Amino acid sequence: MGCRSLLIPAGGIMVNTSLQKNSSVRLSIESLSSDGAGVAHVGGMAVFVPFTAPGDVVNAKIVKVCKTHAFAIVQNVETPGPGRAEPSCPVFGKCGGCALAHLSYEEELVQKQRFVADAMRRIGGLSCEILPILPSPCVQGYRNKAQYPLCRDSDGHIRAGFYAPRSHRVVPCESCALQPPLFAAILRTVCRLLEQAGASVYDEASRRGLVRHIYLRHAVRTDRVMVCLVCTKARLGFEQAFCAALTAAHPQVCSVILNVNPAATNVILGRQCRTLWGEDTLADTLCSVPVRLSPLSFYQVNTLGAEQLYGEAARMAQLDSGDTLLDLYCGAGTIGLSMAAACRQLVGAEIVPEAVENAKANAARMGACNARFLCADAAEAAQQLLAEGLRPDVVVLDPPRKGCDEATLSAVASMGPRRVVMVSCNAATAARDAAWLAAHGYAPEAVRPVDMFPRTKHVEAVIRFSRQAL
């Protein structure tokens, strides 16, 4: 006999007793959740299934049952949905990277547009205009940075790759379609040279070994590469020979850096860097802003996509030549500096001291004499400027994934700018913050989703708010 779906009360919550761990079920995928998993329903209970597409009919295995929902893994796709595509990556689903590579890019954009629209409606309770999503200029090879943990394969060779989802098990992968092809060639050379030098690979369980990560940065405008070895020791016995062989094999390498991280931590980079060969920093240009990047510098990983994102922010800011622009969470100042020529005064604030120094140096290199930068928490900076009597005409907010805190939003609203532009990498926290601003006199007028991270679940959004007449 078939198993019937029976709903019974359990502590006031309806539980679907037909869903049991390790059971097999046939599911019709209705939509995607914001983390990229397919959503189906059995007896009214939501079942989340990674690597499925809307319209798929799949046979799946239940791996976890909670009170209100369940999780499953695909056993086979019986009928593919219209947006499904064949992933080209041999480690798709094994590494923790591309959650959406099983979709066509057109379908991915449709889903990311919906992620943002749903967050604004459900979390923010807002009905503002959602503009069409801006696709990434490049779908493959767009990342200008990669950090590869190391392992040894069954033959004892050093291999680089990525961590499997929710683990620190390394999945070997030296050629990722999201990275520029040059990275794969350099990575193979670095692994071979480390092996020849007899370098040991760091083991997290025993906390022994020398080399933890290989970290590569690419300057799109100059086609130069920084190679950084993350190691547990500050000196390497093979430094000279390594640098000579690496730079002879790859003339694009302009900098070889040693980053020292001896700590028992999940954090990839330590605070100490030493240049083994070449330049201390990597030079690049973003939105006409000249930047210098150390291994520790924050930088958008999709250079061309970032220019598109910041361009949209500038369009929404609608600056006049006499305006004062306040750039909160400014990082190295790139967003504000890209708009500096369009306003009278730029003030940026950032809590990371190194980023503030980078912002000041970037401003000096481009001759932005109308820019100043404060090292302070966004809320403290806004309150300090408010006490100084500074009244910005436009405020740009570019918060981390956790969004803005209420003190920052309150200080911004107290300043009374005519317009606020939010650049967000998390639609859920953006919707929450947009609801707060809407309740305090700043109505969201338009939201523009921007795809900065093709094949992943992440999507950016730019939101324009205008002060409402009392």
Image: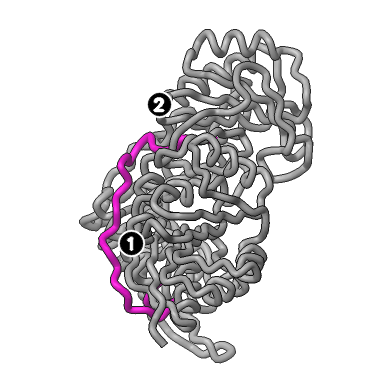
Q: Which residue, given by chain and number where applicable, does mark 1 sit on?
A: 448
Identity, as a three-letter code, of the amino acid under mark 1: Arg
Q: Nearer the viewer, mark 2 or mark 1?
A: 1
| Nearest the eye: 215 or 104 | 215
Q: In front: 186, or 291?
A: 291
Q: Position of residue 417 (x, y in %)?
A: 47, 71
**Amino acid found under the numbered disc labelled 2:** Pro
The one nearer the camera, 434 or 264, is: 434
User: In the rendering, at what x and y percent does residue 350 appear?
Assistant: 62, 54
Q: Residue at x 53, y 47 (%)?
A: 333
Q: Is residue 127 magenta?
A: yes
Residue at horizontal 37 percent and vertical 62 percent from the top = 38
Q: Residue at x 32, y 75 (%)?
A: 128
Q: Residue 85 in magenta?
A: no
Tell me which residue sits at (44%, 59%) in the image. 423
Q: Is residue 247 above or below residue 104?
A: above
Which residue is identified by label 2?
A: 181
